[in-house]
Image (cartoon, helix red, strand yellow):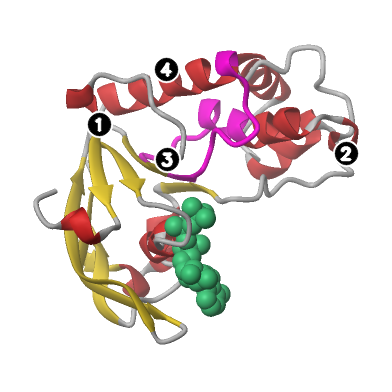
Amino acid sequence: MGQLEAKGLLCERDDRILFSDLSFQVNAGEWIQITGGNGAGKTTLLRLLTGLARPDAGEVCWQGEPLHRDRDSYHQHLLWLGHQPGIKTRLTALENLRFFHHHGDSARCMDALAQAGLAGYEDIPVNQLSAGQQRRVALARLWLTHAILWILDEPFTAIDVNGVERLTRRMADHTARGGMVIMTTHQPLNVAGDKIRRIALTSERAGQ
Ligand SMILES: Nc1ncnc2c1ncn2[C@@H]1O[C@H](COP(=O)(O)OP(=O)(O)OP(=O)(O)O)[C@@H](O)[C@H]1O
């Protein structure tokens, strides 16, 4: 089972301190929402947690080891879905999933697309899908991945109410089975308060 630990993170952008001395742990089965207004540093923090960027001070550890020591093995445990859908718009929805998940046979990929609400759209080039449907193609990976840790930046952007409900259920299932979710969203989450822990990137952070 995994454990992610942020230790004393400092991040500066344009001579402004976004956050400093930020420490927290995420354990198996935990669901974390990073909160804060526009520009508070949520995406920046998520990128530090993925190992794609390095903090100005402090470090991020996975199972006790600093990420930069063995990023490749960390990435086997991680599913990162960034702000952009990160999909190939000339490929079909199904081809996109097969591209990301080589182990995913067509039947599993079709099932994942159905779970994401895209049944009937499997063979359509992604550039002919709506913004929300394109996002759903990326999010269908949540039904295919074996990664224990999901880091999701604004996964609900452009997603309708029904889609948000499906995704929320999927995240709840994942954490109930010992998975970990760290996400940002500006939308209210329809989840019992004790199921989710919030880490605020604001001056109110003290006391969180
Ligand atoms: N590559 C970069 N170079 C310089 N400054 C950056 C860079 N990326 C982000 N910033 C700055 O860092 C700050 C935090 O940006 P970030 O994207 O982390 O905020 P956020 O909390 O995710 O915001 P939002 O809710 O709008 O997505 C912003 O003030 C932004 O201008």
Report the residue marked by disc 2.
127
- Dot 2 or dot 1: first in sequence order is 2
Name the secondary structure under disc 1: loop
Query: In the rendered image of this protein, does residue 197 appear above or below residue 49?
Result: above
State left or right for residue 64 relative to residue 180: left
Front position among marks 4 and 1: 1
Q: Nearer the viewer, residue 108 or 112?
A: 112
- Dot 3 or dot 2: first in sequence order is 2
* Residue at horizontal 50 percent and vertical 34 percent from the top: 145
Residue range (magenta): 139-162
Report the residue marked by disc 1.
196
Label 2 crowd bin: few (<14), some (14–19), many (20+), radius 10 Å: some
Give the alpha-carbon distance from disc 2 to disc 1, as whole Å.
35 Å
Report the residue marked by disc 3.
147
Amino acid on which the number 1 mark rests in the picture: Ile
Front position among marks 2 and 1: 1
* Residue at horizontal 39 percent and vertical 48 percent from the top: 77
